[in-house]
Structures are given as C-alpha cells and as structure tokens.
Amino acid sequence: MSSVSLAAAPPAPGFVATFAAVYAGQVARARVVRASLFFVATLQSLGLVVLLRGVVDDDRVAEKQQVVAGSVVLVIAFVALNLLAQRFGQLRAGHGLDYYAALPVRPAAVVLGIAASYASFTVPGTVIVAVVGALLYGLPLAHLWVLVPVVVLGGAALSGLGAAIGLSARRPELATVCGQLGMSVVLFLGLVRAERMPAVLRGVRAVLPSTYAADALAQALRTDPAYREVWLDLLICGVSGVAALVLATVAYRRAVGAGRR
Amino acid sequence: MTAAADTGVPATTADPAYAVRGLSRSYGDVRANDGITLDIGRGEVFGLLGPNGAGKSTFVRQLMGLLRPDAGEVRLLGVDVVARPDVAPRLAAYLAQDEVAIAELTPARAVELTGRLRGLSRAAARRAAADLPDELGLADAAGRPLVRLSGGQRRLAAVATALVGEREVLVLDEPTTGLDPVARRAVWAALERRRSAGATVVLVTHNVLEAETVLDRVAVFERGRVIACDTPGRLKAAVSDDVRLDLVWRHEPPMDDPTVARLARVAEVTGRRWSARLPTAEARTALGRLTAGAAFAALDDFTLATPSLEDVYLALGGVARDLEHE
C-alpha cells in the first residue's frame, strides 16, 4: 500500500464531472441488471409488434406507423419510466440516497446522470423494435434517424417522470405500482392514433410527453414525413423533458430532505 | 488539516473533530438519541459500542448531517453540520450499514466512482481503485459485482469506498460486521494507517474485542443515551474489583452442588455457557470448589478473566446477549 497522505480535502467535483461519474457508474451497473434493462423491454415491444401485425390491415398505413412508433416508445417507458421509478424507490427506502447525500455532489447532476443512463439503456431496444417493426409492417426506414432525438428527448421526459415518481413514493411498492401504471398508460395511449380515441382519452394523451415522441416517430415512418410536425413534436418532448428533469431534481432534494427530517 | 478553510468556514486547530451538545432525536414515541454530549478529538479512533437499537446509527447519521436532530448541535471541525449540510460531505467520509447504491458495481468500480464523486481526478480515482481492494485483501474479488460477493467481501468493498479520497474524518457504521478475523485485522490496519496520518475515525461496533483493541475511546450507548465514555482501560478500571468467571458445561450442570447453585443465581446464561462477574476472592473460591468437587466432571471449559468492556457494559445495566465476543 502506498503511504497515506492527508492533504487538504479535494475540491468538490463540478457538475459535468459528477454527471459523467454517475452516468459511468450506472452504465457499469447495467452489466448486472441487463436482463431487465435490455431484454425484457425489447421482447415485450417485439411481442406487441408481432401480435398486432395479425390485426392491423395492410391498407391502414397510419395504424401501422402508430403501432410501430408506440411499441418503440414503450421500450423507453419500460426502462426510463418504470424501471427508474423502481430504482429510485429502492434507493429511497433503503437509505441508498445517503450514499449520494454524504458526497459533495450536486443533486441535479446526480439525477441527470442516472436519468441519462436509463434513457441510454433504451437505445438497443428501440433500434431493434423500430427496424424489425418497420420491416414487418413494410414501412420505410429512410427517415429513421428521427429515432435519435426521440430517444434523447422522450428518454429525458420519461426518465424525469420515472425519477420523480420513485423519489416521491413513500414506499418502494408504491414506486413500482406507479411506474408500472405509467408504463401501461404509455402503452395504451401510444399504440392508438388520437383520431381513434374517445375525446376524454384524447385529452389525457395530449398531456403525456410520450405521445409526442410516438407521433414524431410515426411521422418518420412515412415515405414523405411532415417534418414541421416532427420538429414540433420533438420541441414539446424537449420542453417536457426539461420540466420533468427539474421536477425530478426537486423530488430528489425533497427525498434527501425527508431523510434528514 | 486545513480542509475546513477550503469550505469557506473558519475552524481553529483547537476545535475537536466533533463537538456534540445535547443531541436528541425521536421517532414518534421512541427516543433514538437522548441528550448526547461528547467531544471526539482530532486523530482519535473513537468507538460507539452498544446493542442493536441503542441509537448508534441514528447518531452517526446525525454526525454526517444526514438526519436533523430535534434538539442539540453537532459541530464538525468547528462547523455546524445542520446549518451547513455541504460541509460534512467535503470533510468526512461515511460508511452506511448497507451498500444499496453500489450493490451492482465491482469493488474497483465502486471505489473509482466514489473517488470521482469526492473530487479526485480520473487518474487518482483509478489508482485508488487498484490500491484499496489490494490493501484490504480484496484484490481477487475486485472484478466481481458486490451482489455476487460474500457478505464479508461486500463489507470490505464498502469500507474501501469509505477510505477513498483520504478524508480527515471517517464515520463508519459497523465497518467490521460480518468480517472474518483476517479481514477484520485488515480493516483495523487500514484504519490505523489513516489515524497515523492524522485522520479521525468514528466507528460503530457491537464487538467487544474490537472496542478493546483498536479504540482510543469508546462511548457506550444504551437506549439512546451515552452511559459511559472513556478509554477502554479506564472504563475497565472502574469495575476492576471484579473478575469474570466463564464456565462451559459439557452436559446439564449439577444443581445440587451448592457452588453451582449459587453461580446459577448470578450468572448470565447463554446456552451451555455461564458468565458471572464476581469479586476476585469469591471467584477464586468458587473456581477452586468447582475444580476440586464432583461438578468438575460436568465442566467442558472454564476461564477466569479480568474485566472486559462487556463487564463494563453489564455493570452499567446493559444486556450481555446484545454484544459480540468474537
């Protein structure tokens, strides 16, 4: 062992260093929890795409686009909303937030680092479901680059919500239930076009950030997408993402504060 | 030892590592801490000894500013940790009872992550990630996630994360619980090295042997109160008129023997083990009679020992079964 030298305490890490370290730490975690992070979410959405292929008629192109786009966004919801809510619920219940609270780190950097990692865990699944879905339903792949901003912005919005849910839940079971309910809502409202829904559900659909991620992607699965609508959907997704991450940071501060009380 | 100045908060060298005054904390009707007042000097290895539920973990969480007291004050190197919650994370390292936040990381990754979050450069954090598992005898397991390690190895990995960054103050909640003797000695040696370099160590333990061999001073906790606080030597001297007679019976003790019957009334019984604290002369007489009489055939083992911290704890009203002897 090298000799121990107790110099003055090192300065607290900056925002970017904290974000990067937390993100890297979560990516390292993924090695152990990869089954739920990667396979379950992907298989669930692939199953939906295959199953619904049997009930969506060939001439209903808009429905086919919505099914594929909704299934892709479901991967994001499964990981970034549901699993992240469960993770933060566990951390809060098991005094796991003490680990971060006892370190000289900024709450926003911790929340952002964890949320970003969960959003990025969705990349393999979303790519697989989008490509397989497009091929299976005979949709064009030419504009699939839209998947990149969809994952980033939709991931930010849904992981922010997932973090806020997990950090606000008083018991881990509540975080699990809320995360799964949230994912179910994304599932039901993401797979069906707004025009096909009753007015009341259309209202609910309109306030969900996942809606805009799914709609942007559905546009991108057209031969000639209306990019104005795509950008508008992505803009709403981005604004929702920022709001959700701010909400998650507030929830983190409150959870740590509640631990202190 | 000038790190407090870096935080923008003045601290004089006269300040103890921790100054705790009238600290109280309740959970509903339960008083977890009840008016605790003590100082922990710089460079001390200070122990908190007591049974489960005595308030030790609540106390260390308050030392780190992770739990607000209902009343009282905690000063770390002169700085109020409640008023300045940013200070304890800068100056002190904390080891919690479990490792839920880092459970899926390998020990090396956990050390590296914690080091980075304590402000180390990437290179320094990687060096620590290579050195600390080695220092604690964990090198063979350094590449496996904590969840796939034994309980003792997990604890060692968590201790390694507390040591990274070489903080001035180490606050460790049960660092050696679940460790085998070899691993425990590795932790003690690592802490001694930090103490030699000027660090202050505050640790929670249930282990009497640990308390006697590695601590400079010990606070004995019972139901949220500190019932004694001194060096192990002075605490034991307080009950020095007594000795402890330990008897281990091979089979049912002969209760018709008057010496055995008398001991049965005063001994703490744990399975086949009887442990009695007696005045020296009385203990010698009792042992003489036991070894000379028919009861000797029923005895498997016996020990006559000077008082331990367990005896101090018992003398102060504690319950022996709550402490570890290993």
Image (cartoon, helix red, strand yellow):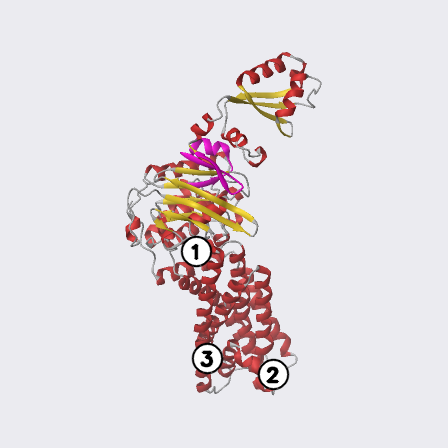
Disc 1: which residue: A100
Give the image location of residue B136, x and y in percent.
42, 40
| C-alpha span from label 3 to label 1 | 32 Å
Disc 2: which residue: A200
A55 horizontally vs A232: left or right: right
- Numbered disc in front, either 3 or 1: 1
- Numbered disc in front, either 3 or 2: 2
Question: Which residue type does callout 2 highlight?
Answer: Val
Question: Which residue type does callout 3 highlight?
Answer: Ile
Residue name at image x 59 percent, y 74 percent: A185
Residue name at image x 46 percent, y 59 percent: A257
Local secondary structure at mark 1: helix
Have a look at marks 3 and 2 and say if they share a chain.
yes
Q: Which residue is outermost to the right? A: B256
**Does B314 appear above or below A198?**
above
Q: Disc number at residue A236?
A: 3
Q: Are marks 3 and 2 in contact (CB under 8 Å)?
A: no
| C-alpha span from label 3 to label 2 | 21 Å
Local secondary structure at mark 3: helix
- Range drawn in magenta: B202-229
Give B22 or B251, whichever is nearer the viewer.
B22
Q: Are marks 3 and 1 in contact (CB under 8 Å)?
A: no
